[in-house]
Image (cartoon, grey):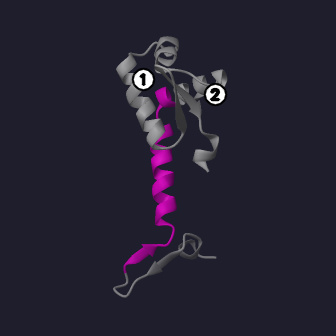
Amino acid sequence: MSTMNYLNITPDKNNNMLFENADVIKKANVVVRAIDSSIRQKIVQFIEAHGKATVTEIHTALGIDQPIASRHLAVLRQAKIVNTNRQGKFVYYTANVSGIE
């Protein structure tokens, strides 16, 4: 099987290559970029180890500033690697294992 067939690439009428799985590739790119950070990897590991965590728990445990932790969590949320759950005034983050599929 050629690489082009494996990736479902087909030429259009102008002989430009089209990816039939473009959405899948875009989603994979977002996930890879999100986990391509040692801080974000540590955040996900911390959340997985504790089941759920607030940004305060994360920034305190990892020794990073709260705004930095919040920015990294936003990237992880956008990539659907973590979920949020508001309980009163607290927002808890949990790992979203199914979001990486």
Which residue is label 2 attached to? 48
Graded by Cα atoms within 10 Å as few (under 14), some (14 to 19) or many (20 or more), the crowding at tag 2 reads some
Image coordinates for residue 11, horizontal then vertical, percent: 43, 82
Image coordinates for residue 35, horizontal then vertical, percent: 50, 38
CB under 8 Å between discs 1 and 2 = no
Which span of residues is magenta-colored? 16-40
Residue 86 on the magenta span: no
Q: Quadrant of residue 67?
A: top left
Alpha-carbon span between mark 1 and mark 2: 16 Å
Q: Residue furthest front?
A: 88
Which residue is label 1 attached to? 69
Q: Main secondary structure of the magenta part?
A: helix
Q: Where the N terminus falls, by quadrant? A: bottom right
Give the residue type at disc 1: Ala
Q: Which residue is drawn at 43% across and 74% down?
A: 18
Q: Can residue 36 be seen in this view?
A: no
Q: Residue at x 59, y 46 (%)?
A: 100
